[in-house]
Image (tube, rainbow, N blue to C red):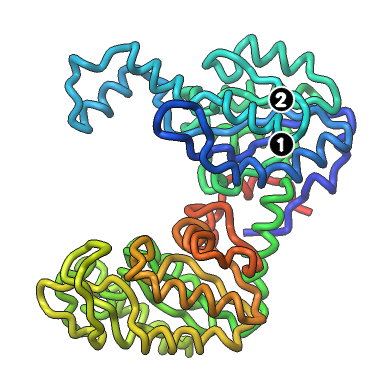
């Protein structure tokens, strides 16, 4: 995939209407109060928005929020599959489920952060008459926000008619700016389809992701060390396979390490294990040998008698976990091995925690790796998702070179997959 894409700086935006795809899928308070509990994603969009406004563009921002089901019959079917009584699934409840994912709280917070009014389109018709009228009246230096893009039935299907209608809001001289990295791995109407009807460039957020992750994959400062954790081999096998082509060292931690241990004849007790992926694990070990890549696996592990924060625990050699016990973190010898491996790295990519970091008792491995990365001179790239959450939670975010804003997108990026929301942008 070509990572060298045009950005907002490469085009003249003055006097133009810009359809800007952001990632405003922010966490909300569960009490239905409409309070945003973390505005990080809104803040991440500010540099691009402010630049466009300062340059005299009129900004039509859009984003999805949660997973609303815009079709009543499909909503009933999904709720029934979850065990809900069909007789209780009324249209009123369906409408309330949609109402809970409106963009009013985002518009309010964005207005506060920008210090100017953000006009909000009404209703649940994303490209309906209200949105059309407000977009037509929008003047240079003004900003509006469309309603939740997933209110539109054609959004997730990348319906060309919906994409065309979205693009039409920006008018004949309009521009599409993609700045929602967390959604670029999805070929939706608002993330990829609109680029068939408007010239498309990236915002600063996506440019940063392409520069750092794309740069690390295409031309890394060496040695390149990849740290891969998390629970499942199945979710990371594509990443491991791709990184074996370019990395100097690959470090395996988290729950997926037990599938590797079992594949090599070890006992893993009640630890996470994907039997169907054991042969793939052995293939990866062999591929590392063939490629001359250093593949590091745990040498010891912290085990627990139950999956709980107050579980009894002890350290055992890797592959020697007794029945009734499960591995929840890498052990102290593994911590030393892994931290030594990143000391002299040129670039480190980290995706996935080393253990169950949500439990203080089993956070030592993840914490030690985060601390080691905070002290290295290497370019450090954190691949979104749980690893980003861990770095934030442990207080090391400020010491990392780059923390990705997209978990799924960064994973597919590292797999070498084409990202539809990036592929559609104009090349430089």
Residue 363 position, x and y percent, is 38, 70
Q: Position of residue 151 (x, y in %)?
A: 49, 23
Residue furthest out toward the front: 310
Position of residue 8 in the picture relative to residue 369 (left or right): right
Identity of the residue drawn at 19% across and 72% down: 312
User: Where's the C terminus, which quadrant?
Assistant: bottom right
Q: Identify the secondary structure beneath mark 2.
A: loop
Where in the figure is residue 142, as x and y percent of width and height?
Answer: 80, 25
> Which mark identifies residue 118?
2
The relative height of residue 413 versus residue 195 in the rendered view (above or below) is below
Label 1 crowd bin: few (<14), some (14–19), many (20+), radius 10 Å: few
Which disc, if any, is residue 22? none
The answer to which of 252 and 96 lies nearer the viewer is: 96
**x%, y% of residue 296?**
41, 85
Query: As rendered, which of 253 and 218 lies closer to the eye?
Result: 253
| Residue at (21, 78) in percent of width and height | 262
Q: Earlier in the sequence, mark 2 or mark 1?
A: 1
Residue that mark 1 sits on: 113
The answer to which of 88 and 212 lies nearer the viewer is 88
Position of 177 relative to 388 (above/below): above
| Of the pair 349 and 248, the residue shown nearer to us | 349
Q: For residue 174, which quarter of the picture?
A: top right
Q: Residue at x 55, y 47 (%)?
A: 182
Task: Determine if residue 412 is in view.
Answer: no
Compared with 359, 96 (above or below) is above
Residue placed at 54% from the left, 28% from the top? 149
Mark 2 touching mark 1, by CB under 8 A? no
């Amino acid at each position: 995939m070509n990572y060298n894409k045009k950005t907002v700086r490469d085009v003249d935006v003055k006097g133009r209407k810009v359809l800007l795809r952001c990632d405003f899928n922010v966490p909300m308070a569960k009490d239905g109060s409409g309070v945003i509990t973390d505005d990080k994603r809104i803040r991440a969009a500010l540099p691009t928005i402010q630049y466009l406004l300062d340059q005299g563009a009129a900004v039509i921002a859009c984003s999805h929020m949660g997973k609303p089901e815009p079709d009543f019959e499909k909503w009933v079917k999904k709720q029934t599959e979850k065990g809900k009584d069909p007789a209780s699934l009324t249209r009123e409840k369906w409408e309330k489920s949609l109402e809970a994912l409106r963009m009013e709280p985002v518009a309010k917070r964005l207005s506060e952060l920008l210090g100017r009014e953000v006009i909000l389109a009404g209703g649940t018709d994303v490209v309906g008459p209200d949105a059309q009228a407000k977009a037509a009246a929008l003047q240079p230096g003004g900003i509006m926000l469309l309603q939740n893009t997933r209110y539109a039935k054609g959004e997730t299907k990348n319906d060309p008619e919906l994409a065309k209608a979205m693009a039409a809001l920006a008018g004949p001289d309009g521009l599409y700016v993609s700045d929602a990295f967390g959604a670029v791995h999805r070929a939706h109407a608002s993330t990829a389809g609109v680029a068939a009807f408007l010239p498309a460039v990236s915002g600063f957020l996506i440019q940063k992701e392409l520069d750092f992750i794309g740069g690390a994959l295409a031309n890394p400062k060496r040695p390149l060390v990849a740290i891969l954790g998390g629970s499942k081999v199945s979710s990371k096998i594509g990443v491991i396979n791709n990184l074996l082509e370019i990395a100097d060292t690959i470090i395996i931690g988290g729950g997926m390490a037990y599938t590797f241990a079992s594949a090599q004849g070890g006992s893993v007790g009640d630890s996470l294990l994907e039997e169907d992926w054991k042969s793939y694990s052995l293939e990866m070990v062999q591929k590392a040998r063939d490629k001359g890549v250093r593949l590091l696996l745990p040498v010891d592990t912290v085990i627990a008698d139950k999956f709980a924060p107050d579980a009894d625990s002890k350290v055992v050699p890797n592959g020697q976990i007794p029945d009734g016990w499960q591995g929840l973190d890498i052990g102290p010898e593994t911590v030393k091995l892994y931290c030594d491996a990143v000391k002299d790295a040129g670039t480190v990519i980290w995706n996935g925690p080393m253990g169950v970091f949500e439990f203080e008792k089993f956070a030592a491995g993840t914490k030690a790796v985060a601390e080691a990365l905070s002290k290295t001179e290497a370019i450090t790239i954190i691949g979104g998702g749980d690893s980003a959450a861990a770095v934030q939670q442990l207080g090391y975010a400020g010491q990392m070179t780059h923390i990705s804003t997209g978990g799924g997108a960064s994973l597919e990026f590292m797999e070498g997959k084409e990202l539809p929301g990036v592929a559609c942008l104009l090349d430089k």
